[in-house]
Amino acid sequence: MRGSRILGLGFHVPPRVVTNDDLSKLMETSDEWIVQRTGIKERRWVDGDVGASELAEHATKKALADARVDAKQIDLIVFATLSPDVNFPGSGCLLGARLGLPGVPALDVRNQCTGFLYGLAVADQFVRSGAMQHVLVVGAEVHSTGIDISTRGRDVAVLFGDGAGAAVVGPSEDEHRILDTKLHADGSHYDILMVEAPASRRNPRLTHEMLDEGRHFPSMDGKAVFKQAVERLPEVIGEVLAPHGLGIADVDLVVPHQANLRINEMVAKRLGLGPDRVFNNIDRYGNTTAASIPIALCEARERGMVRPGSRVVLAAFGAGLTWGATLLRW
Ligand SMILES: CC(C)(COP(=O)(O)OP(=O)(O)OC[C@H]1O[C@@H](n2cnc3c(N)ncnc32)[C@H](O)[C@@H]1OP(=O)(O)O)[C@@H](O)C(=O)NCCC(=O)NCCS
């Protein structure tokens, strides 16, 4: 039966490195606090006016070259981001224009840290059904222009970085394919991590008062997010493996979303996974939300941790709440 697989990967991060010491000049924080609580040492921030679609374009070109697929062969663009270039239209449309693909459909996915896995599931369904041959799935974020870079916003500001990762998904006729995906959402906790304004439920959507209160910046109940993440991630990893008669011992590598090293360490401990079977790169990029999994997967493959035949689980948890896992055989 026809399936789908990732034919090529690519990622791009802006060249500007922002260390924890750089941040401690902008707000009351310290390298020690950030490393101890999150594992993050540095992140990348864009310089000047650079939107998510620009980062995505660079990542896409690398993924297309890796897949040996021409841009003209893309049947659908799926663009996962919480930081679109403009409020509307979606960044998928802007990326299509950058790639010179007029008429190619573009779908923006608004599922935050789980966005890439939702996008991959869409691609898998279109390719598996035979409706499409090549679907581009991109996760790209520019956080640095949307966070409160001051002591007031330090709990969130130190976590996030800019970047993009892309995958070209195409058909597979053998066992090297996306084997399964489990996706979840629970909006009853939507407000533990969100950006409220501009808000269609407020009239007007944005006021000077809202700006003064910083309601256009992300707000987060970090402890609540942490608690949910360490429950949901092991749960959904088990859920994606069980129907295939597989356990965690059968998995070569888990590539989790990079939200916080402590979350991933706790998840690994709960699952009984040693550090050689969990890939982390949050120390260098921070949390790049929808981009974190494709960036991590790309680096893991470059380091030889993902090889033909490897059983890999991608797992994400984030705002929404949304969470999910993808099981694939490379
Ligand atoms: C954000 C997070 C690192 C905070 O760690 P924590 O141990 O829960 O810290 P707290 O929020 O309890 O804050 C402890 C203290 O540090 C302070 N603090 C917060 N951010 C700080 C920073 N960047 N630098 C220095 N101090 C900071 C707080 O003000 C608080 O001070 P107080 O004790 O005087 O009130 C942690 O909750 C976390 O990682 N949560 C998950 C976040 C996440 O993954 N988000 C993305 C999901 S996709």
Image: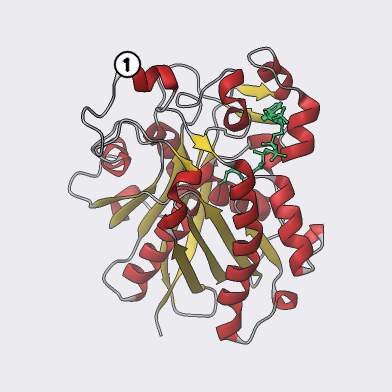
Toward the viewer: 122 or 258? 258
Q: Position of residue 18 (x, y in %)?
A: 64, 22
Inspect the image, locate mark 1, and give the three-letter code of the amino acid beneath it.
His
Position of residue 207 measured from the top left corner of the image (x, y, whole percent): 29, 20
The number of callouts visible is: 1
Task: Give the residue displayed 30% in from the left and 74% down from the top.
Answer: 130
Position of 245 with respect to 78 (left or right) is: right
Quadrant, the N terminus: bottom left
| Residue 330 seen in this snapshot | no
Up/down of 197 relative to 314, above or below: above
Task: Judge by depth and name the residue closer to the eye, 191 or 245.
Answer: 191
Quarter occupied by the C terminus: bottom right
Relative height, residue 70 to residue 233 (above, below):
above
| Residue 133, quarter of picture | bottom left
- Residue 170 image-quadrant placement: bottom left
Mark 1 and ligand 1: say if the CB distance to the nearest ligand atom is below 8 Å.
no
Q: Is residue 80 left or right of residue 227?
A: left
Q: Residue at x 41, y 51 (%)?
A: 111
Residue at image position (43%, 49%) is: 190
In the rendered view, how is the structure colored? secondary structure
Nearer to us in this view, 67 or 243:
243
The residue positioned farthest toward the left in the image shown: 103
Identify the residue position indicated by label 1 in the image: 208
Q: Is residue 162 visible?
A: yes
- Where on the image, by quarter, is ligand 1? top right
Query: What kind of element bears circle 1?
Result: helix
- Find residue 37 and report its horizontal and vertical position in percent: 75, 38
Q: Residues within 10 Å of mark 1 (few under 14, many from 20)?
A: few
Q: Position of residue 286 (x, y in %)?
A: 63, 37
